[in-house]
Image (tube, coloured by chain):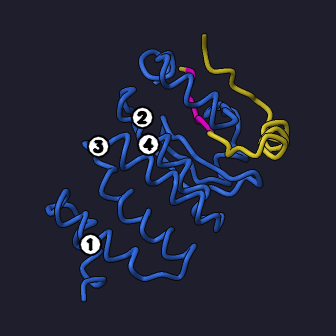
Amino acid sequence: MEIHWMTDEADALKTARQSARPVLIDFVQRA
Amino acid sequence: MGTVTYPNEHVIRYVSDNFIPFRVDFDNESALLRRYNIFWTPTILFTDQAGNARRRITGFLPPPAFLSHLAMGNAFVAFWGHNYSHAAELFDAVAGDFPGSMLAPEAVYFRSVARRKATNDNSHLDVAVEELDRLYPDSEWALRALPWKD
């Protein structure tokens, strides 16, 4: 089990509107 | 966050049940970094469905503390979106589920603000004053509620 992160902003906001949920944005540095 | 907090089963469940999780690469998404004024990692933003930022966390948090911040972020998205009745329920959940957390007195304060905004009934502020005095007398939120005393 893990968090399924979306990576496209437009898709995330569209999904948020459709599901009536807020968005949790994680800014992450890979290095 | 990636090795300790996000793999935690309680964090996974809360995030999956309450948010749309969206991950941004700090090194490659410069437009989003500028828009939200992000200059440090980890930074976590809570936004509404239009992308308006309503709360942010900067810095690592272990799972128990992060869970309380998730609940608080959820409440503030509702609050700043003027969904006061729903926000009051969510602040009440923070105060009830995390009574020993750093966020609990803030949740008590904003629960009463949200209830006051939802009902126009000032007695909700009296409840906050009493509860903050009783449970969190040394907190900054008890001081912020001082003007509400008769």
- Name the chain letter of the residue that bears numbered label 2: B
Amino acid type of the residue that numbered disc 3 sits on in the rendered structure? Ser
| Discs 1 and 4 carry the same chain letter | yes
Q: Which residue is mark 1?
A: B129
Q: Which residue is mark 3?
A: B101
Q: Residue at x 43, y 53 (%)?
A: B92
Q: Is tag 2's residue or tag 3's residue first in the polypeptide sequence?
A: 2
Chain that is yellow in the image = A
- Name the chain letter of the residue that bears numbered label 4: B
Find residue A21 and name its label: none
Q: Which residue is mark 4?
A: B69
Say above or below: B137 vs A3. Answer: below
Q: Which residue is mark 2?
A: B66
Amino acid type of the residue that numbered disc 4 sits on in the rendered structure? His
Q: Position of residue B44 (x, y in %)?
A: 53, 41
Contact between marks 2 and 4 (CB within 8 A): the answer is: yes
**Disc 1 to disc 2, how far (Cα)?**
27 Å
Which numbered disc, 1 or 3, marks the residue closer to the eye?
Answer: 1
- Count residues near mark 4 (Cα–Cα under 10 Å), then give few for <14, some for 14-19, many for 20+: many
Q: Residue at x 37, y 32 (%)?
A: B61
Q: Residue at x 49, y 16 (%)?
A: B9
**Disc 1 to disc 3, how far (Cα)?**
18 Å
- Count residues near mark 2 (Cα–Cα under 10 Å), then give few for <14, some for 14-19, many for 20+: some
